[in-house]
């Protein structure tokens, strides 16, 4: 189980990533491509 410090660091990292995505105006598909995730539509 994660302790409070680990959870805080993960939250801060997620917020920073979100800020960078918004600054660059990236779409969800572009972000997934950068992360190596492949999206499929149904």
Image: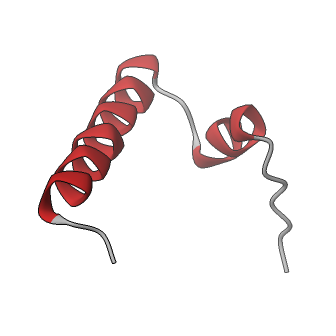
* Residue in view at x 69 percent, y 45 percent: 32
Q: How many marks?
A: 0
Quadrant where the image shows the C terminus: bottom right
As drawn, is 9 to the left or to the right of 36? Answer: left
Depth check: 13 or 36 in front?
A: 13
User: x and y percent of residue 2 in the render?
Assistant: 30, 69
Is 15 situated above or below 24?
A: below
The answer to whether residue 24 is above or below residue 39 is: above
Where is residue 33 drawn, in percent x and y?
77, 38
Question: Quick one: 24 or 16, which is closer to the camera?
Answer: 16
> Which part of the image, by quadrant, shows the N terminus?
bottom left
Residue at image point 32% right, 39% down: 13
Q: How is the image coloured?
A: secondary structure
Name above or below for residue 1 compared with residue 34: below
Q: Image check: 35 left or right of 5?
A: right
| Farthest residue, direction top | 24
> Which residue corresponds to the image point at 39% horizontal and 34% vertical from the top-left?
17
Q: From the top left corner, tell me how far across and down residue 39 is, in percent.
A: 80, 60
Q: Position of residue 28 (x, y in %)?
A: 59, 47
Q: Give the quarter of the image for residue 16.
A: top left
Q: Is residue 31 left or right of residue 37?
A: left
* Residue found at x 26% / y 54%: 6
- Horizontal side of 15 relative to 35 (left or right) equals left
């Amino acid at each position: 189980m994660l302790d409070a410090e680990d959870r805080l660091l993960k939250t801060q990292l997620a917020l920073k990533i979100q800020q960078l995505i918004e600054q660059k105006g990236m779409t969800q598909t572009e972000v997934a491509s950068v992360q190596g995730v492949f999206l499929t539509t149904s």
